[in-house]
Amino acid sequence: MSTKKIVAALSSAVLLSGALAACSDSGMGGDSASGGLNVKAGVIGPKTSPASQYWTELERGIELAQDEAEERYGVTFDLVKRDDKGEPETGARLIQELLNQEQVDVLFGPSLSGVALQVAPIIQRSGRPWMTGIPTADEIIDYSAQPNWAFRTNYNNAQNIEAVAATAFGEGKTVGMIYGTDGFGQAGYDAVRSYAEDNGLDLVKAEGVDPGATSMTAQVNALRRDGVDTVIVWFTTGADHATMLRSMAQVSYEPEVVATATILDPAFTELSKPAEWDGTVFAAPIDFQAPELTDLTDRYEEEYGEEPLILTAVWSLYSATLTYAAAVAEAGDANDYTAVRDAMESLESVEVLGQTFDQPFAEDDHELFTPDDWIAYRFDESGEVVKVD
């Protein structure tokens, strides 16, 4: 399977083991025309903003899951969409509108951590199920507020930091970092720096780069001068990672390990050469070598005429849609918010494209992934993703 197929396939189908309770009539969250349960879902993200790709994948991840949600669980969705423009204040206003005026049964999004952090207390007070979707900020789910209504099917920052650090830090390694100056990169730098300080580790050099930069020779030269042999990379896109590797080649800088926090997209291997990606490793909580991934990738390309733009986002929203649908089917009523939340916390097993998550959620754990789920990968000489031994 090619890198293009494997990495672009970060989408998922979610299958729950065990019988689900029969569906019942329930007003707004009641029978659909086909005799199943209908959900009114609020979908909110940055449709008109520099980060509009996060809206695209939020919307598409849900759309791609709907046929399976209906077929498997008898649940259909009416989507009520709002554009928060990537602005926390706008997001807060629109969340109030979705909850109070539209009376949605569940919320998907916002897509950006800054907006999600702003609206989290509002949603928590409303007592409405919240599938957080894409954001990775740990603080979005505040477990001091119970019962908690937020469920995350993406990884969080703490898990990502631990997975990257396990690859990068070690005896005899001189570790530096290069990161994007956007929100994702800055958050990554702050987290890595804190991790190093908390664990008595030394991050000897860190260099920020504007996303989309055509050259990073100044930054990689700075790392080389400080003797960095292991580089932690925190970019949003594989294209920036490819630019960094080209810059390293230009100045003859060959670190032993390049550990990236980004699950690299197809642009990476299209814009770089095998000799440049030889030392690159990345960690992910997804089994890229599971054959089930390719089916959904093909369907995405057939539906939209392109590969996924942000791979983990599609995976997260697809799995969030089906996981929520399973809980609604078990509760029998999308309007019974407490029953739906309890059903989410009580799921015995979730299978996601060949991976099984036993007891994925609990009262004090609304994260699908754990640090134990992560797998280290590298690229072979043909550009295919393989597991690190």
Image (cartoon, rainbow, N blue to C red):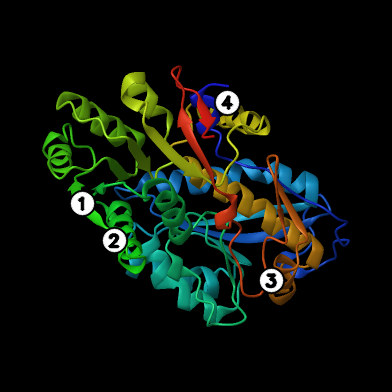
For the point 42% across and 33% down, the residue is 265
Q: Which residue is mark 1?
A: 206
Mark 4 / mark 3, whichever is N-terminal: 4
Image position, residue 4 (x, y; %): 49, 25
Q: Give the answer, above or below, for where 23 lies relative to 253.
A: below
For the residues labelled 2 and 1, say whether their Cβ atoms are less than 8 Å apart. Answer: yes
- Say whether marks 3 and 1 touch (CB < 8 Å): no
Looking at the rendered structure, the secondary structure element under dot 1 is strand
Q: Mark 2 to mark 3: distance in Å?
A: 36 Å
**For residue 98, side relative to residue 175 (left or right):** right
Q: Which residue is mark 3?
A: 341
x then y, percent, for residue 328: 74, 62
Amino acid type of disc 3?
Answer: Arg
Amino acid type of the residue that numbered disc 4 sits on in the rendered structure: Glu
Q: Nearer the viewer, mark 2 or mark 3?
A: 2
On screen, 317 above or below 238? Answer: below
Q: Residues within 10 Å of mark 4 (few under 14, many from 20)?
A: few
Q: Quadrant of the N terminus?
A: top right
- 74 horizontally vs 179: left or right: right
The Cα atoms of the two marked residues, 3 and 1, are separated by 42 Å
Q: Which residue is tagged 2?
A: 193
Out of 99 and 384, give the one closest to the viewer: 384
Residue carrying label 4: 302
Q: Is residue 38 above or below residue 140?
A: above
- Crowding near pointer 3: few (<14 within 10 Å), some, many (20+)? many
Secondary structure under badge 2? helix
- The answer to whether marks 2 and 3 mark residues whose Cβ atoms lie closer than 8 Å is no
Q: In what quadrant of the picture does the C terminus appear?
A: top right
Task: Kindly report which numbered mark, 4 or 2, lies closer to the viewer in this rendering.
Answer: 2
